[in-house]
Amino acid sequence: MIEFRSISKTFPGGTTAVDDFSLVIPSHRTTVFVGSSGCGKTTLLRMINRMVDASSGDLEIDGENVSTIDPVRLRRRIGYVMQNSGLLPHRTVIDNIATVPRLNGVPRKDAHERALQLMDTVGLDRSMAERYPSQLSGGQQQRVGVARGLAVDPNILLMDEPFGAVDPIVRAELQQELLRLQRELGKTVVFVTHDIDEAFLLGDQVVILEKGARIAQKGTPEEILANPASDFVASFVGADRGKRALSIREIDGARVLVDADGTVAGRLVEAGPS
Amino acid sequence: MNLFLDALAWIGDPTNWQGSTSIPVRIGEHLFYTVLAVLAASIIAIPLGWLIGHTGRGREIAVGISGAARALPSFGLLFLFVMLAGVLLRGPSTVLVLVLLAIPPILAGAYAGLEVIDRRVIDAARSMGMTEWQILWRVEVPLGLPLLMGGLRSGTLQVVATAVLAAFVNLGGLGLPIVEGIALRDYDRMLGAAMLIIALALLLDALFAVLERYAVPRGVRARRAPELRTAAPRRRAAAETPATT
């Protein structure tokens, strides 16, 4: 469990990125911070592994205040996946994945064995182990990034727009892979994105943020869509338009769903036993 | 053209290759001052350059001092030092002048090498839990090596060309035949020695060209050529960068 208690962050330049933010992030679930550029969502994420220190307030991981933990030690037990993967260009795929275990003193052979298993986990062919990041596609690099994030088997995995720089088809594929991984591994995932569709797809808990990291609404995707807390949320999630505003139309006794553009989205059926 | 042939004849003259004033001895002296100066300059400039490159602080001061140092007239400086320190210390004075000459390019190579590294790579290294030392030694130094080699290369070339000055305070080197040549109006000797200095410089340059090539980490060399030129714009290297989402 990660708990933000009245966290604020003002950068030296005077910008207040986070203003009195409080939130509980449950364990073994995916929590998504979603909001537009500059809303402070990445700052929130980076506070968890102390890449950014809060100006005021407390941040606790399983009851332990992070400000009392040495940043290096803290970061080594938290997985971090970033946009553009951030792989070390002078190291091979396998060495990139094994980086943190090696820093922790795991023998090279064991670390490499584990790295190969992780390549299987994230769906990378083992034959790529000796390649360099520059020889991989964007999607493959992202997979290596995820494998590296998982290398020390952390409880917490932080993901900062990890699929932001890949094309839509690869992104959809990686999102499905992440859902599968999360079903298998059950990590506490904190995910940052500006894409509401991605947030609704991946998040058990979705936190919609406004400027200054003010929580516009938090809840499950269903709760947010059913009851947008404000006009801002309604417009941000697009509850009143496009493919989320579905209406029922009856054709020959069957009921079909049509979205706001008049495109048929599907057919209404009785919910089966679930 | 005759002049060049005569100079070559001077170089080829077997009597110039024997004894305590022979060409090999002069080359040895010349290389000795060069290596000593580049080594001393490296000991000062590389750690300083890495410090500047790693922290992102002090860059303006370093650029300013380096620029000023480049503009110093080596010849004038040499006589100033010899006059201040005394003739007995003319050896150290000479090396000091050469060190001052070699510091700016080496310093620039050291910090520029770190500066051009994609900030996201360093950010990733830090967020994985590397200590600042580990970031420096395992990420920044290997990735910055090619530019450092470039700095050493240009520093060495300047020193090898300027080490001629040693002869003016009677310390030998390949400058000595030139100084003697001027006094004796022996143009073969002057030109021959000049040609030897040029050859030495070209040789060292070629050596560094090879080293520079091998200094490029394999993963970076494997990169397709156009991407090599897209160095990311530099942001602050401090641990706390404002979020960029």
Image (cartoon, rainbow, N blue to C red):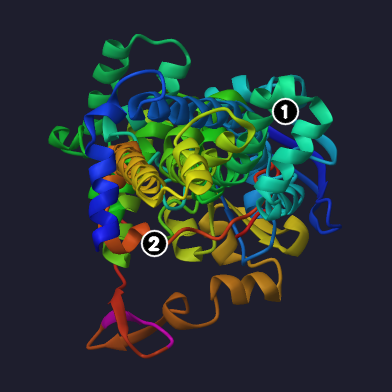
Task: State which chain disc 2 sits on.
Answer: B
Foreground mark, 2 or 1, reads: 2
Please give left or right for residue B147 compared with residue A228 in the image.
Answer: left
Q: Which residue is mark 1?
A: A60
Q: Indicate the amino acid at tag 2.
A: Arg
Q: Residue at x 35, y 57 (%)?
A: B228
Q: Say whether residue A143 is left or right of residue B176.
A: left
Per the model, the C-alpha gap separating discs 2 and 1 is: 43 Å
- Residue A37, x across and y down, in percent: 62, 66
Give the class, few, some or many, for how many residues have Cα within 10 Å of label 1's Cα (few <14, many ≥20). Answer: some
Where does the magenta region start and end? A254-260
- Circle 2 residue: B229
Is residue A258 rendered magenta in the image? yes
Chain under disc 1: A
Instruction: Decide which of A68, B142 is in the foreground and name it.
Output: B142
Mark 2 crowdedness (10 Å alpha carbons): few <14, some 14-19, many ≥20:
few
The correct choice, above or below, for A147 with respect to B147 in the image is above
Considering every residue shown, the one lying at the far front of the view is B184
Say whether residue A187 is visible: no
SS for tag 1?
strand
The amino acid type found where label 1 is placed reads Glu
Q: Nearer the viewer, residue A253 or B148?
A: B148
Q: Position of residue A32 (x, y in %)?
A: 55, 50
Image: A181 above or below B75: above
| Lateral position of residue A228 relative to residue A68, left or right | left
